[in-house]
Structures are given as C-alpha cells and as structure tokens.
Amino acid sequence: MRGLEGRVAFVTGAGHGIGEACARRLAAEGAMVALTDIDTAAVDSVASELPEAAAYHCDTTDSASVTATVASTVERFGRLDIVVNAAGHNLGGTADAEPTEEQWLRQYDFTFVGAVRCVEAALPHLRASPGGAVVLIGSISGLAALGTEPYGAAKAGLVNLARNLAAKHGPSGVRFNVVAPGTIATRAFATKPEALDELKAIYPLGRVGQPADVAAAVAFLASDEASWITGVTLPVEGGLLTGPGHLIG
Ligand SMILES: NC(=O)c1ccc[n+]([C@@H]2O[C@H](COP(=O)([O-])OP(=O)(O)OC[C@H]3O[C@@H](n4cnc5c(N)ncnc54)[C@H](O)[C@@H]3O)[C@@H](O)[C@H]2O)c1
C-alpha cells in the first residue's frame, strides 16, 4: 500500500467525487498530494485530513491558473511525478437534442483542452521524474454511445490524446493512460439516488461504481507496478461494455 512513497501527485477536481478519492488513495500510497479544484473550501477540507498535502485553487479552463498551480506545487514539494486529471463533468444537453456550437466548444475546452493544459504545464517536471505518469479520467461515454455527444466525443478525444502522448514522450519515460469509469456514485446523483438504483441493472456486476473503484485503478496506473503500460484506456465499468448478455440470460 506504499507504492508511491516520495512521489508528488497533482490532482485536478480533487474537492469531490472521483478526484477526491484519487487524492486520498495516492496519499495512502505514500504520495505527497497537491489537491486542486475551483472549489477551494472543498480541497482545503480534504487536504487537512491528509499527511502531506497542499490545497490550491486551480481552474483547468484557464491556462494561467494551471501553469501557476503546477509551479506552486513544484515550489512546495520540489518535484512533480504524477498528474491525475479528474476535473470535469457533462456540461449539459440531452441525447435527443441537437447540441449548439457553444455547447460543443465549451465541453471540448473543459474536458479535452483542460487535460492538455495540465499535461503541458507538468511535462517538464514529469520528464525529470524517475516515474512520470499521467492518468486522465475519461468515461465509458467516450467508448460507446451512452449520452450527450459533446461530452462523449470530448472524452473519446482523451483516449487518442493519451496514445499520441504515450508515443511521443515514451522515450522520456513519461507514461500516459486513461481510466474510463462507468456510473460512479458521486454528488451528481445526490438528488436522484433512485437513478443509481435503476442503473444497477445494466451492470453485469450488479452495482454502480464507487469513487474508490476508480481511485484503485488510477493508483495502479500511476505506480511503477504499471511501468510498462502506456497509451491504454482501462474501463472501470462493472462489465457494462461486455454488452447486454447478462440481460438476455
Ligand atoms: N460520476 C460518474 O458517473 C462519472 C462517470 C464517468 C466519468 N466521470 C468523470 O469523472 C470525473 C470526476 O467526476 P465526478 O463524478 O467525481 O464529479 P464531481 O462533480 O463529484 O467532482 C468534480 C470536481 O471537479 C471540480 N471542477 C469543476 N470544474 C472545474 C474546473 N474548471 N477546474 C477545476 N476543477 C473543476 C468540481 O469542483 C469538483 O470538485 C469527471 O471528469 C467526469 O466526467 C464521472
């Protein structure tokens, strides 16, 4: 459980849900963690419970904010080894409505370019690390037709981004992977727990996921245990992508 001793991790969207779980899990593995989010109170609170952690306001839609926060992290901890990009959510629209151009651009900027901003700011430091690793949080929505097009397409872009960056920066020793979660019980479902109950049925493993399920996969891909794994997308989705076999019986 201490496979990340001495490593420094930068986690976006660390105030809630999956990002928070990743920050907690990386800390449990021995990493020093920079918890970053636009919800400063939330990251302050989570960081106060971790042994070696710092909380920062960081907006992944703002390059200057990302660059400054990466710099503060390196100033504070002296290095940067791991980036986990968890900030994000579906900015809206419904599957049967035509997205507007504005919706396409906003979702792409938030989900896709947001990840690019983090990678670009962190890369010089990751290259200097003995185990530089980036884990992007994608979604099963990026792997199948499961909802709104802008969100799914932007998440799909992360799959190819990780492949390209893995090829480009492999010789520098930096690895890039994606974790693609299925339905995870986070605050998006807080007001509609019945939706989670209904969704259980579509998962062969009979339950929706918890943030810790995703964090476990992230911790593995960020660690030296995964030192020969790069450019892949790991679905963490209770078997959903196997298809409807369990429903057919
Ligand atoms: N919950 C799910 O079912 C699910 C499934 C697949 C993928 N995901 C993905 O997992 C990631 C985390 O989702 P979650 O369900 O934990 O959501 P969440 O709302 O619980 O947490 C997201 C965090 O991102 C922060 N955030 C929002 N905008 C930001 C910005 N511009 N800059 C920095 N931080 C920002 C929020 O303040 C929040 O703390 C997202 O990328 C989401 O698309 C979630």
Image (spheres, rainbow, N blue to C red):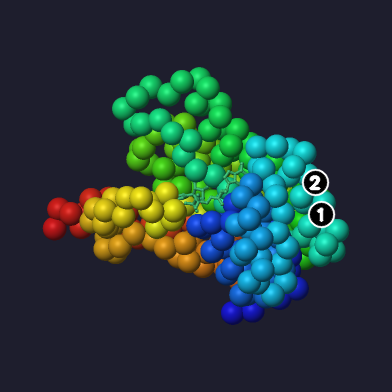
- Residue 245 in the image: x percent, y percent? 21, 54
Residue at figure coordinates x 48%, y 35% from the top left = 91
Asked if the residue under mark 2 is in contact with the one under mark 1, i.e. CB atoms within 8 Å, the reply is: yes
Residue at figure coordinates x 59%, y 68% from the top left = 24
Residue 231 visible (yes or no): no
Q: Amino acid at mark 2?
A: Ala
Residue at figure coordinates x 72%, y 54% from the top left = 56
Residue 36 visible (yes or no): yes
Which residue appears farthest toward the bottom when viewing the image?
Answer: 1
Which residue appears farthest toward the top when viewing the image?
Answer: 101
Residue 14 picture quarter: bottom right
Name the element at disc 1: helix
Give the number of marks. 2
The residue that disc 2 covers is 68
Q: Residues within 10 Å of mark 1 (few under 14, many from 20)?
A: some
Name the element at disc 2: helix
The residue that disc 1 covers is 72
Q: Is residue 143 above or below residue 13?
A: above
Q: Nearer the viewer, residue 244 or 171?
A: 244
- Residue 180 in the image: x percent, y percent? 47, 52
Q: Nearer the viewer, residue 111 or 198?
A: 198
- Image quarter where the N terminus lies is bottom right
The CA span between labels 1 and 2 is: 6 Å
Which residue appears farthest toward the left when viewing the image?
Answer: 249
